Amino acid sequence: MSKLVIVGTVAFDAIETPFGKTDKILGGAATFIGLSAAQFDVDGAIVSVVGGDFPQSYINMLSSKGLNVDGLEIVKEGKTFFWSGKYHNDMNSRDTLVTELNVLADFNPVVPKSYRNSEVVMLGNLHPMVQLGVINQMNDPKLIILDTMNFWMDNTLEELLSVIAKVDVITINDEEARQLTNEYSLVVAAQKIMQMGPEYVVIKKGEHGALLFHENEVFFAPALPLEEVFDPTGAGDTFAGGFAGYLARSGDYSFENMKTAIINGSALASFCVEKFGTERLLTLTDKELHRRLQQFKNLTQFDIELT
Amino acid sequence: MSKLVIVGTVAFDAIETPFGKTDKILGGAATFIGLSAAQFDVDGAIVSVVGGDFPQSYINMLSSKGLNVDGLEIVKEGKTFFWSGKYHNDMNSRDTLVTELNVLADFNPVVPKSYRNSEVVMLGNLHPMVQLGVINQMNDPKLIILDTMNFWMDNTLEELLSVIAKVDVITINDEEARQLTNEYSLVVAAQKIMQMGPEYVVIKKGEHGALLFHENEVFFAPALPLEEVFDPTGAGDTFAGGFAGYLARSGDYSFENMKTAIINGSALASFCVEKFGTERLLTLTDKELHRRLQQFKNLTQFDIELT
């Protein structure tokens, strides 16, 4: 089993969906990534920052899931990053109501010494300079995975490109892949992104699944068709966390094993959306995950005789 | 091998895409369905109507593919159905420029006597009353497959529902499934459609693949990620034709075999969009199809150890 470093936000979210609304609840990319990766009992460390308003009980909960929190800086006099959003009726689009960076504005990530030789680094969505700061503290990791979003393409493209050049895997959604490359075809977009640095490109299509590209090969992981999506918040981070966690546990970073890692990420994401925030991940059992992986297998496997 | 009856339009199409435009070329639902099903060497009959302006060479070509044309009525003094459309840059939407029903306006389908005991009936997109007319001429077929579209939901909903009640499989796109049921979730929509009659529901999602529902089971067939879609015209019909043709050849109408049939339909559709109209289907070899089926297998198969 390899060690895993996770950088990203640890946050308060207030969420409104057609099914209800929450007060400030636990959220943030690193939180979802960590809880998802923790499903594989990896030795993972969260590198992030919170304010004095962040409950110790949340930190204890992360620790209890086996996540190291030595790199989770607490700025006593500061406030935790806060995001509030409202989903539309189709759950495929949302309005951001509030974004308060707070302690995140001046964040200098510090990777705990004992994790600087981790094999796997998961860079959750954050300012590219913070992501770069983490990369620079690592001792020759075997796999760096980058998640990012259009906000950084719009505002810090040069810095983002310098990070993209240094990573092995990028996860990005379909519209972002098109924006980054000015190509409509996802196949062509993926080829262009591979020329920017990453050997592997994962394009997330939400309810339409995800594509994994590597050289001239491609693998497709469907999303599980669901009767109801209760709250999509954190689904993408949960997907990335499952992907990174599965790979870290196995220590096998081949294309073949990434296929299985993506299916695991998709399965975990399908749980995430069943309840508000991190709620469903916190109660998830191995048995439930295995049952869902079997559903993914039933969903996609077919017999064909090829002559 | 079972016999197959195909009803649908045989038409002239004039197509404009970002890659070019055509004069009046061969098109129509029954044409694409027939050419796609013919890939499986089935004994299929086309039931349709054309005008005196329809070239004998097209009819000869259909015959040469093993398709029976005794049910292809020729109205000497009439004109063939004509459709013209222009695709937008993303190829996912199009404007219809011209629709001339012509001989289709008074079409009374006649299934050739020797095909009334066919096991499989493929009802291509047409007026529901024409589809019903074909069903009523059949002697207890084992599998009736219905393709339809929103136009009939908007204009002849009651007639359409009476046809839906009589079929075993319906193929429909995602937006149409939502319109028919007033449900956003495709899982819930499929359940509602099954309550209307069909035991199997195929929901087509274009570039996002297709879902097959049966009782509480679901199967997902991806679309092949393509560098370029040259002309989407006829892709849905080609999909349906491959599905019907594969099932007719095997004579096995189980859910398991339908999975393989859908993959075959998807593979054939992926060829259809490579050139204008029927052009690519006409030159398609078994070897090319097998190679593409292998690509679908590579695209979706993964290893998972379930404990």
Image: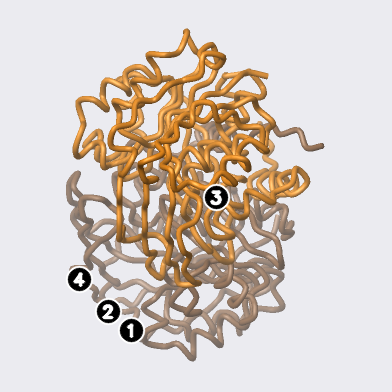
Chain colours: A orange, B brown
Q: Which mark is residue B98?
A: 4
Left or right, B37 with respect to A174, comes to right
Q: Residues within 10 Å of mark 3 (few under 14, many from 20)?
A: many
Please, which chain is the residue tagged with disc 1 on?
B
Instruction: Label 3: state its secondary structure.
Output: loop
- Viewer-nearest of labels 1 and 4? 4
Q: Residue furthest right?
A: B307
Instruction: Label 1: state its secondary structure.
Output: helix
- Would you name the residue on which mark 1 appears? B105
Q: Residue at x 65, y 52 (%)?
A: B259
What amino acid is found at the position of numbered circle 3 in the picture? Ala
Cα distance between the residues tagged 2 and 1: 6 Å
Cα distance between the residues tagged 3 and 1: 43 Å
Please, which chain is the residue tagged with disc 3 on?
A
Determine if marks 3 and 1 fall on one subunit: no
What amino acid is found at the position of numbered circle 4 in the picture? Val
- Would you name the residue on which mark 2 appears? B102
Residue B162 visible to the viewer: yes
Q: Residues within 10 Å of mark 4 (few under 14, many from 20)?
A: few
- Viewer-nearest of labels 2 and 4? 4
